[in-house]
Image (cartoon, rainbow, N blue to C red):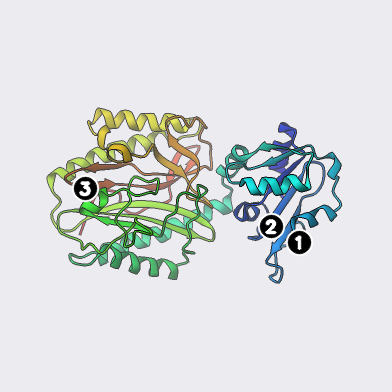
Amino acid sequence: MERIDKIKSIMGQKEIDLAIIHNPLEIFYFTGNMVQGMLFIPLEEDPVLFIRRPKERPIKKTLTYQYIDRLGEILSYPLSWKNIKQIGVEKDITTLSMLERIKKILPHGKFEDISLEIRSLRMIKDKEEINKIRKAGKIIDSLFAKAKDLINEGITERDLALELEYISKQMGNIGIYRMRNKDNETSFAHILSGANTLVSSYLDAPTGGMGISSAFPQGPSHRKFKKGEPIGIDIMINYDGYIADATRTFVIGEIPDKLKLLNQKLMEIFSSLKENLIPGNTAEEVALKALETAKKLGVDDIFMGIGRDRVKFIGHGVGLEVDEFPFIMKGFKISLRENVVVAVEPKLMDPELGMVGIENTFLITEKGPESLIEFEEDLIRI
């Protein structure tokens, strides 16, 4: 109930009488149950979980719960309904229709946005969450090692993706990668080579890839690997609900000198990021240092994308979702704290050479960042 206590503390500060959580992922975060329904957290009373489905599957009895078929049935539960004036909801993910339905059963309530507070609460991971992300990182290490064995001239991006995804699921990867921004969606890996490393997509990410369908125009395609060109492998693993994210760049045969030089500059930017991932620095400060380094090295125009499709972030929090707080970007002034987990992913996109990129998932500690990905970081020659 520690998480419930924390949200109640926030409610007290904001003078909120009732918080309503309806996102199944956050119901899971607060209760340990992945259900459709609503979690009601009254400030002065015990929380109650109203479950629409499943009704025939055992649940963890971590708090009081009640099965419902319709939202109006909630009013039969003995809460001090008349005292509810301020209602906390997550406006960034709560639809207008859902707000209208809540308004029908609580007509005197005024909605207050608690999105920022809940995302900030989830940003700080506990030991169990960190251990799950750490295990996801171990799977990524194994997959990079396997990729090093499997990459050959002539096999396709998709061939490698299918093989690695199969292995990942044998190792415990759930295979779903949740995102808070519902306009975004992604899959197991962006395995991209040569010119495909420069192809952007509707996903808000530095790389996109061609994919195999206009219905999902991102990710690996049927393009075959060739000697001397970059092969970017950006993998996410979901272990028991928690995500780690990492990227490595491979090259078959001799690495062109220009690609080596580009990678040297990339690693300087990466070093700047790591040096500044310390408690007390804001996410913006970390980003500005990296942008300053990119400008000093003369690659700011190809950093994190090309032209109008460049992304604004250099890193992002990970946990139950891919796009958690904090975002390493200009304007994001939340300070890093101990036990924040963040993936930083500097990438350089040369119009002639293709992309070189690196990404690690880091745990912020009082001693500095601890990488949860241990596989070699430099350009990897096959």
CA neighbours of label 2 inside 10 A, class few (<14), some (14 to 19), many (20+) = many
Which one is in front, 172 or 57? 57
Q: How far across and down, in percent of the image, does residue 113 sit?
A: 64, 37
Left or right for 343, reference 94: left
Sequence-wise, the earlier of marks 2 and 3 is 2
Q: Dot 3 lies on which element?
A: strand
CA neighbours of label 1 inside 10 A, class few (<14), some (14 to 19), many (20+) = some
Which one is in front, 148 or 64? 64
Q: Which mark is residue 320?
A: none
Which residue is label 3 attached to?
354
Which one is in front, 94 or 163? 94
Which one is in front, 211 or 133? 211
Sequence-wise, the earlier of marks 2 and 1 is 2
Residue 252, located in which quarter of the rendered image? bottom left
CA neighbours of label 3 inside 10 A, class few (<14), some (14 to 19), many (20+) = many
Q: Residue at x 26, y 67 (%)?
A: 150
In the rendered structure, which amino acid carries the disc numbered 3? Gly
Left or right for 221, reference 283: left
Which residue is label 2 attached to?
37
In the rendered structure, which amino acid carries the disc numbered 2? Gly
Q: How far across and down, in percent of the image, does residue 23 sit?
A: 62, 52
Residue 2 visible to the viewer: no
Look at discs 3 and 1 and give the one toward the viewer: 1
In the rendered structure, which amino acid carries the disc numbered 1? Ile
Q: Residue at x 22, y 31 (%)?
A: 298
Which residue is label 1 attached to?
68
Q: How far across and down, in percent of the image, does residue 317 sit?
A: 48, 44
Considering only vertical position in the picture, is 361 above or below 214? above
Q: Dot 1 lies on which element?
A: loop
Sequence-wise, the earlier of marks 3 and 1 is 1
Residue 99 visible to the viewer: yes
Q: How far across and down, in percent of the image, does residue 295 sit?
A: 27, 29
